[in-house]
Amino acid sequence: MRLTKALAPLALLAAPLAAQADGVTTYPFDGSFEDATFAVETAIVGKGLVIDYVSHVGEMLARTGADVGSEVTLFAAADVFLFCSAVTSRTVMEADPMNIAHCPYGIFVADRDGDVVIGYRHYPDGAMQEVQSLLDDIATEAAAF
């Protein structure tokens, strides 16, 4: 037991450090975009959840940039994984049926100049913090992959 207590601070150093800004939490991913998307997919499915849709935001932005008069490359790649949890969704919507506005939930993976991050947006205080906790569990698991 003493060894466990002594090693606990070292475990914290090994965990990815979250960055929080503008209502978003991100975790750095030490690897490729493809490895990060695989890690996110694995973490979501590993929780018994089903991915409803993967939005290829990076591809869309690259494809439409010239059409909207922009030459700015925002991401080398960026995807958003959309999913729901029957258990968590029921809990938060029983607390307030208007929490439907937050469903489905999303975790994103983005590559900007070789820096890959995994993240999610913040949810309101109250019942939706259960969803935010789920998202953080998935994101930290994937970031440590």
Image (tube, helix red, strand yellow):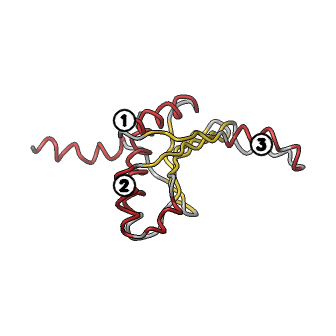
Circles 3 and 1, Cβ within 8 Å, touching? The answer is no
Residue type at mark 1 is Gly
Which SS class for mark 1?
A: helix
Please name the residue that numbered disc 3 is placed on: 73
Please name the residue that numbered disc 2 is placed on: 88
- x, y percentage for residue 35? 52, 29
Q: How far apart are marks 3 and 1 (CA)?
A: 33 Å
Which SS class for mark 3?
A: loop
Residue type at mark 3 is Thr
Q: How far apart are marks 2 and 1 (CA)?
A: 15 Å
Question: Is 9 placed above or below 23 here?
Answer: above
Marks 2 and 1, the one that precedes in the sequence: 1
Q: Which residue is located at x 87 percent, y 50 percent?
A: 68
Please name the residue that numbered disc 1 is placed on: 46
Q: Distance between the residues labelled 2 and 3?
A: 36 Å
Residue type at mark 2 is Thr
As drawn, which residue projects farthest toward the left? 1
